[in-house]
Image (spheres, coloured by chain):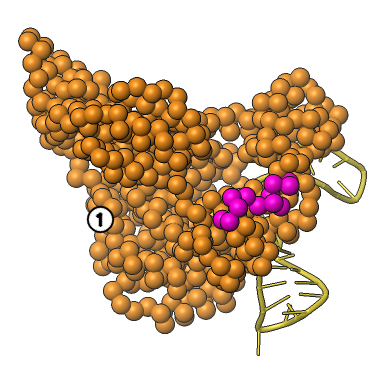
Chain colours: A orange, B yellow
DNA sequence: GCCGTTTTCGGCCCGACTGTTTTCAGTCG
């Protein structure tokens, strides 16, 4: 089950959207949005909290606390149900289309009766929007483009969503009597950035109890197919999950087979054929007499083919089979190698956890160093000032103690020309500066490239944050000549971020690979806005693995002294 | 609806961009 806080946050978000669509007080809608973010980022579980405890959460007052309690007691909230009855779910769903907000969605519904993305697409192609106030030809064109963008994402979910489902199922099935082994495989084990469906693999002598337990899990909405070897279900959130049960003797071969990727497996099976062997999900066999060679562990299967065991994150047919053959697979960076985080926020800007809470949570995770990098002043909505920044620095210096070194930094805004928020004098006061693009996403490729190159050339910019600025499923990456940007980063000693946030994962793995060829170093950061986001680090590390990175490549895996030397080297550019 | 060493009422994250309008509404970060 999802975290109770996330369930509540989803409900509050929906209520905020419905308020906005029905044209209620905009500030009221925003209040619910804020409360949703705050609840999602709250460290303690809200289920079972009383009104007093709930109201201690910032942004939650008497009314929202009451609704949360009502939700846990009755399973629903009357106020939400009332608005749900007024507005078809499809109207809200239409606002996933970029450029279509609540006001326009409501106009489309009221004037034309449109209540789905498909209905909107049809209406546009039939020209039915013409004449509708506020919907000119350019708007229609932009909406069509937005629909394409939204559609490209359908059917895939963010990696954290899939992981939560998979870990819950593995946990539940592992407890079933007779279950000998259970784990997730497929694209989730390879840690692809989004997941189409979840593959669960289990080993048992008798698959029936596992299949029954699986089909009866609380998160299962529908059983799609049910058999002895395989059962497929759809979860209440619409995610397809396949369970395959194999004999323990086939475990290794099955795990290898169901982890994929398809292209990787094709390459591995070619190796088998050349050795007079045949590889299937049941094992590695001799072609001549059909006798079983090995099948119990993945390591054995790879070894018998003359290959080193290939980490799942590398299994994409990007040269890993050859590397496994001649023993040149990299020693991949792991979660345990990470020593620090250089991009995090607090309540001083848009975080929902205080400085003290963030530091305590980071310490609890055993980080050796941690940079607080709240937004800089040129992002107007953050209302940052020089005085606030300096006051935060004083506070950090006063709080700093113990085994974790706290660095004071900021997340600068790269303006359209490549400049940043402050002058050299003020910038020199920071221990570390991340610089990110937060506006003017649609510049030409040449302008965007120059913008990034100039930012790299700034002696006070140590890290470029979430370089492509994409938001998976919502906003495409900006267009730049990445090789030119990477060359500038390499030349100037500017690290590029691997942002671990599940809807960013930015740089993506293919661009990390390209950047590495230019000698670029990387910072795996969480961009945490709450203590619970610190756990996203695993997803950033996985993207780094997929790009073959080792600890040498990642500055946040370095000891503090080496990191400091890297940061100090920058102003001499 | 929330919140307060400016306020228990009256603000609230502010500004830019876009397409549409002929003075501005909606969307976005």
Is residue A416 visible to us here?
no
Return the x and y of residue A360 as percentages of the image width and height. 39, 71
Q: Main secondary structure of the magenta part?
A: helix
Is residue A331 visible to us here?
yes
Instruction: Tell me what residue is drawn at x 28 percent, y 74 percent.
Output: A403
On the picture, is A224 further left or further right than A560?
right
On the picture, is A516 further left or further right than A147?
left
Question: To which quarter of the image does residue A263 belong?
Answer: top left
How crowded pointer 1 is (Cα within 10 Å; few <14, some 14-19, many 20+) is rated as few
Return the x and y of residue A474 as percentages of the image width and height. 56, 40
Locate the C terminus of chain A and report the quarter of the image it occupies. bottom left
Instruction: Tell me what residue is drawn at x 58 percent, y 32 percent.
Output: A149
Q: Give the magenta-colored segment's residue range.
A: A72-83
Is residue A33 rendered magenta in the image? no
Which residue is tagged 1? A336
Q: Nearer the viewer, residue A44 or A515?
A: A44
Q: Is residue A476 above or below residue A42?
A: above
Return the x and y of residue A223 as percentages of the image width and height. 45, 28
Q: Which chain contains the residue that carries disc 1?
A: A
Is residue A80 rendered magenta in the image? yes
Q: Nearer the viewer, residue B7 or A2?
A: A2
Instruction: Tell me what residue is drawn at x 18 percent, y 20 percent.
Output: A279
Return the x and y of residue A538 as percentages of the image width and height. 34, 50
Q: Is residue A314 above or below residue B29?
A: above
Question: To which quarter of the image does residue A176 belong?
Answer: top left
Q: Nearer the viewer, residue A72 or A276?
A: A72
Q: Is residue A364 above or below residue A156?
A: below
On the picture, is A385 further left or further right than A46?
right
In the structure shown, which secondary structural element does the residue marked by tag 1 occupy? Answer: helix
């Amino acid at each position: 089950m999802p975290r109770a806080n996330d369930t509540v946050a989803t409900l509050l978000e929906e209520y905020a959207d419905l308020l906005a669509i029905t044209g209620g007080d905009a500030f009221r809608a925003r209040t619910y949005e804020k409360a949703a973010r705050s609840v999602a980022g709250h460290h303690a579980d809200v289920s079972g909290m009383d009104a007093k405890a709930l109201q201690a959460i910032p942004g939650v007052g008497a009314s929202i606390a009451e609704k949360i309690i009502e939700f846990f007691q009755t399973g629903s909230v009357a106020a939400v149900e009332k608005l749900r009855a007024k507005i078809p779910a499809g109207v809200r769903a239409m606002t996933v289309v970029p450029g279509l907000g609540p006001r326009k969605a409501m106009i489309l519904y009221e004037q034309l009766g449109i209540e789905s993305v498909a209905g909107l697409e049809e209406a546009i192609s039939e020209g039915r929007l013409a004449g509708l106030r506020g919907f000119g030809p350019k708007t229609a064109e932009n909406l069509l483009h937005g629909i394409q963008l939204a559609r490209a994402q359908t059917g895939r979910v963010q990696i954290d969503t899939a992981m939560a489902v998979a870990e819950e199922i593995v946990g539940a099935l592992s407890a079933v009597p007779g279950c000998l082994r259970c784990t997730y495989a497929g694209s989730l084990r390879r840690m692809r950035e989004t997941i189409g469906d979840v593959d669960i693999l289990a080993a048992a002598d008798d698959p029936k109890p596992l299949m029954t337990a699986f089909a009866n899990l609380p998160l299962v909405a529908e059983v799609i197919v049910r058999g002895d070897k395989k059962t497929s279900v759809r979860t209440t959130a619409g995610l397809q999950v396949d369970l395959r049960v194999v004999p323990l003797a086939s475990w290794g071969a099955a795990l290898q087979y169901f982890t994929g990727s398809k292209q990787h497996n094709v390459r591995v099976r070619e190796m088998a054929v050349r050795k007079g062997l045949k590889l299937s999900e049941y094992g590695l066999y001799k072609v001549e007499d059909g006798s079983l060679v090995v099948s119990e562990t993945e390591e054995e299967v790879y070894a018998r083919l003359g290959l080193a065991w290939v980490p799942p994150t590398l299994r994409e047919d990007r040269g890993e089979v050859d590397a496994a053959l001649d023993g040149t697979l990299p020693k991949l960076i792991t979660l345990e190698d990470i020593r620090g985080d250089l991009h995090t926020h607090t309540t001083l800007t848009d975080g929902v956890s205080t400085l003290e809470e963030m530091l305590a949570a980071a310490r609890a995770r055993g980080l050796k160093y941690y940079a607080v990098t709240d937004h800089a002043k040129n992002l107007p909505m953050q209302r940052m000032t020089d005085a606030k920044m300096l006051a935060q620095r004083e506070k950090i210096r006063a709080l700093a103690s113990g085994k974790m070194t706290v660095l004071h930094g900021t997340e600068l805004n790269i303006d359209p020309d490549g400049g940043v928020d402050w002058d050299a004098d003020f910038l020199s006061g920071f221990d570390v500066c991340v610089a990110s693009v937060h506006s003017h996403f649609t510049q030409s490729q040449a302008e965007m490239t120059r913008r990034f190159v100039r930012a790299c050339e700034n002696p006070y910019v140590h890290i470029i944050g979430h370089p492509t600025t994409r938001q998976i499923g919502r906003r495409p990456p900006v267009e730049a000549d990445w090789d030119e940007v990477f060359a500038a980063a390499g030349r100037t000693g500017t690290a590029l971020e691997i942002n671990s946030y599940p809807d960013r994962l930015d740089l993506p793995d293919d661009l990390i690979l390209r950047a590495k060829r230019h000698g670029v170093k990387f910072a795996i950061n969480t961009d945490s806005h709450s203590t619970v986001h610190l756990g996203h680090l695993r997803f950033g590390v996985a993207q780094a693995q997929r790009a073959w990175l080792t600890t040498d490549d990642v500055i946040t895996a370095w000891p503090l002294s080496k990191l400091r030397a890297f940061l100090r080297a920058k102003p001499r550019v």
